[in-house]
Image (spheres, rainbow, N blue to C red):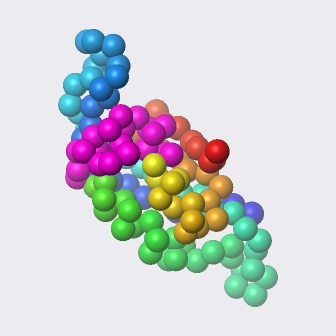
Amino acid sequence: MEIYKEFTFEAAHLLPHVPAGHKCGRLHGHSYRVQIHVSGELDKQLGWVMDFADIKKIVHPIIKELDHYYLNDIPGLENPTSENLAMWLWNKLEALLPLSKIVICETCTSGCSYSGG
């Protein structure tokens, strides 16, 4: 079974490798939404895969590293596309949670999902 917990943060960035004149090459910001999906067996007694509070306790400090920061200044996010952000989060969390997927939404209509590897 798979469950997820959603987080939000605000951050600025620019994409340094886009063609000259591309709008994403200029400094801009997003209201990001992040879904952290975990999977596992349903605990028959508790009735859940994992306590959502445990997910929050693990993920929230990492989200705080991003919230209201310039993403390009964070080591590993020098080219902070949604795809690279998803992989960065995966690498931070994979030893801490039974991840199955990370979903990044940088706008209401644009985002990505990453399932590792």
Q: Residue drawn at (73%, 68%), measured in percent from left and top?
A: 40
Above or below, comparing residue 46 to residue 98 in the picture = below
Based on the displayed image, in which of its 4 quarters is residue 64 positioned? bottom left
Based on the displayed image, in which of its 4 quarters is residue 43 positioned? bottom right
Q: Residue drawn at (23%, 33%), measured in percent from left and top?
A: 28
Specify whether residue 37 is painted magenta: no
**Looking at the picture, how far across and down is residue 32, in whole percent?**
37, 46
Residue bounds of the magenta highlight: 68-87
Q: Residue drawn at (68%, 73%), measured in percent from left and top?
A: 49
Above or below, comparing residue 110 to residue 58 in the picture = above
Q: What is the number of callouts on the image? A: 0
Closest to the observer: 86 or 47?
A: 86
Specify whether residue 78 is painted magenta: yes
**Looking at the picture, how far across and down is residue 103, in whole percent?**
53, 47
Q: Residue furthest top?
A: 20
**Looking at the picture, how far across and down is residue 60, in whole percent?**
39, 67
